[in-house]
Image (spheres, helix red, strand yellow):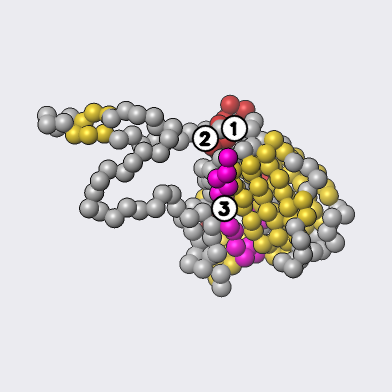
Amino acid sequence: YWTLGRQALLEPIRWRDDDWWETLGGDLSTPFAIPQSDKPKLPHGMPLSDDFADGLGLQWAYFKPGPDEYDRINVADGKLTLSPSGEYPSDSRPLCFIAGDLAYEVETVIERKPGSRAGLLAFYDDTLYAGLAFDDEGLLFHRYGMERRRNNEIPKNSPKLHIRMKNDRHVLTFYYRTSEDQPWLKMDVQMEVSGYHHNVAYGFLSLRPAIYAAGTGDAIFEKVTHKALNYF
């Protein structure tokens, strides 16, 4: 799972009587018990979903942000409005978060203004990404850092799109629908993305869920939900 990037690990230690510490060892690839303490135990990790009710969540970060990049963001009434930058993910500086699960789903609802191109990505860097987006002409499929037009799946000038991305142990699948009362439609192309990592593209990064807005119009994201798929 090199797509997850380099990771920091915690190892249990104990303090000796001479005030030096030593490691306790063990199999660090599996969970270990929290030492007994009177302090309350906290849940593991942090929520990665964001309904934008209290501003922008701490999990988000731009890819290579410019000095005024965060001026593109406006959060109000439980929605994130992202002003456009560039034309495609390669030059739009997507907004990303790190997902450390081996399998997960990310879902978002995007309202697009005329001239906007917006979508949901599995993003490594500006040369290597995959995703699904839409603009005035219809659907746009991103593969290996390249764009492929899909004109017939949704009507031109569609103002809103629901997108779901499932990364199931490096197998990437996209689903879409134009309204909540419609069934999800599965894209006919799946992608194997185990090669989207540092040994291929350098950068010491990870393959992250991301959203982007490009073109000439704003994109409004109503919510972004993340769900881990911990089945075996």
- The answer to whether residue 220 of the structure is visible from this angle is yes
Q: Secondary structure at mark 1?
A: loop
Q: What stretch of residues is rendered in magenta?
A: 210-232
Residue that extends furthest to the bottom in the rendered view of this protein:
77
- Foreground: 213 or 28? 28
In this view, which residue lies farthest toward the left? 18
Q: Percent x, y for residue 229?
A: 58, 47
Q: Residues within 10 Å of mark 3 (few under 14, many from 20)?
A: some
Is residue 81 visible in the rendered image? The answer is no
Classified by dominant secondary structure, the portion drawn in magenta counts as: strand
Q: Nearer the viewer, residue 228 or 50?
A: 228
Q: Name which quarter of the figure residue 143 lies in.
A: top right
Q: Which residue is mark 2?
A: 5
* Lateral position of residue 38 relative to residue 53, left or right: left
Residue 25 is left or right of residue 57, and the answer is left
* Kind of residue at badge 2: Gly
Q: Which residue position holds label 1?
A: 197
* Mark number displayed over residue 227: 3
Residue at 82%, 63% in the rendered image: 157
Q: Is residue 160 left or right of residue 229?
A: right
Q: Mark 3 and mark 1 in contact? Answer it, CB < 8 Å.
A: no
Query: Label 1 is placed on what type of residue?
Result: His
